[in-house]
Image: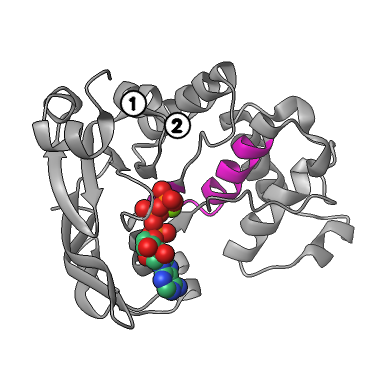
């Protein structure tokens, strides 16, 4: 059974149809990329899946359970975490504190625990695990705002991982990164997915990154799916070449 499934998701903004019947099935442990031109509806799709927007029509299922139209915090509690196109960290807190907040909130505890002598070791251990997973274990006390752009993107992913999600949605994890940073974040995404058998759905415009890590790719154009499949098949698809990839890719 697929871990994440959508059935005929349609989203209209007044007269404008941003999504027009999107049905996807994503398997546990899969890395799925969603690609397509600007305005194709990719972020809107994430917004519907995470409860930020209610769909006009259609349904979303997580592990077989319908979650359509639930509130964002409920959907997060069911196990879907996301990052945004724009980095969403607390710049004035340390790297450790940025990870500790979602770990504690998952456990329904708060930062006041930091001041308690018996601040639980398992919370600290979880934070350290996440930091080593994202390769920031040496930046534990760094103020997050002082990190390089590449490390901020890693921290952003770490904040998502800290809640132990079943599905992690990444909206343009390589945006604004140079080629070396893009390779580093690509490796990180792949290793997290493999080590934790985590399902990752990512929206991305960097085609080298997309084609190197995806198990499957779904192509959106003007709110519909125009192609879907393994990277080697999508790369040769005439519709996708015309709509997005171009002849030279
Ligand atoms: N809240 C909203 N109200 C009205 N229109 C919206 C809203 N959100 C998105 N849209 C429109 O829906 C369309 C799809 O937008 P969306 O942000 O999903 O595109 P995208 O595929 O993520 O593009 P990009 O690659 O540029 O991030 C766009 O035309 C956008 O202007
Ligand atoms: Mg977008």
The quadrant of the rendering that contains the C terminus is: top left
Quarter holding ligand 1: bottom left
Q: Which residue is mark 2?
A: 189
The residue shown at (26%, 30%) is: 245
Whether label 2 touches label 1, CB < 8 Å: yes
Which of these two is toward me, 174 or 185?
174
Q: Which residue is mark 1?
A: 213
Q: Position of residue 89 (x, y in %)?
A: 69, 51
Q: Secondary structure at mark 2?
A: helix
Q: Secondary structure at mark 1?
A: helix
Residue 79 visible to an observer of this rendering = no
Which of these two is toward me, 111 or 91?
91
| Total numbered circles | 2
Taking the magenta stretch, the answer to whether it contains residue 169 is yes
On the picture, is 112 further left or further right than 237? right
Q: Residues within 10 Å of mark 1 (few under 14, many from 20)?
A: some
The residue shown at (24%, 49%) is: 220
**First of labels 2, 1 by sequence position:** 2
Where does the magenta region start and end? 152-170
Which of these two is toward me, 95 or 44?
44
Q: Position of residue 161 (x, y in %)?
A: 52, 46
Q: Position of residue 221 (x, y in %)?
A: 23, 51
Q: Residues within 10 Å of mark 2 (few under 14, many from 20)?
A: many
Q: 79 above or below 184? A: below
């Amino acid at each position: 059974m697929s871990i994440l499934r959508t059935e005929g998701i349609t989203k209209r903004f007044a007269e404008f149809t941003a999504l027009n019947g999107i049905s996807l099935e994503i398997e546990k442990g899969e890395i799925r990329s969603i690609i397509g031109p600007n305005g194709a509806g990719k972020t809107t799709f994430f917004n519907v899946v995470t409860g930020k927007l209610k769909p006009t029509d259609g349904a979303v299922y997580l592990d077989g359970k319908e979650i359509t139209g639930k509130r964002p915090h409920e959907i997060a509690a069911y196990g879907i975490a996301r990052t945004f196109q724009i980095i969403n960290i607390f710049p004035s807190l340390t790297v450790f504190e940025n990870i500790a907040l979602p770990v504690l909130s998952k456990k329904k505890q708060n930062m006041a625990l930091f001041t308690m002598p018996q601040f639980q070791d398992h919370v600290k251990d979880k934070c350290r695990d996440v930091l080593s997973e994202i390769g920031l274990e040496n930046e534990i006390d760094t103020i997050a705002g002082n990190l390089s752009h590449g490390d901020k993107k890693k921290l952003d992913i770490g904040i998502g991982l800290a809640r132990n999600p079943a599905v992690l949605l990444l909206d343009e994890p390589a945006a604004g990164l140079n080629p070396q940073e893009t390779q580093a974040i690509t490796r990180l995404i792949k290793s997290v997915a493999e080590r934790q058998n985590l399902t990752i759905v990512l929206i991305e415009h960097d085609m080298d990154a997309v084609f190197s890590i995806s198990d499957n790719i779904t192509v959106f154009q003007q709110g519909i799916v125009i192609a879907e499949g393994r990277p080697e098949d999508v790369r040769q698809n005439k519709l996708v070449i015309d709509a997005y990839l171009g002849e030279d890719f």
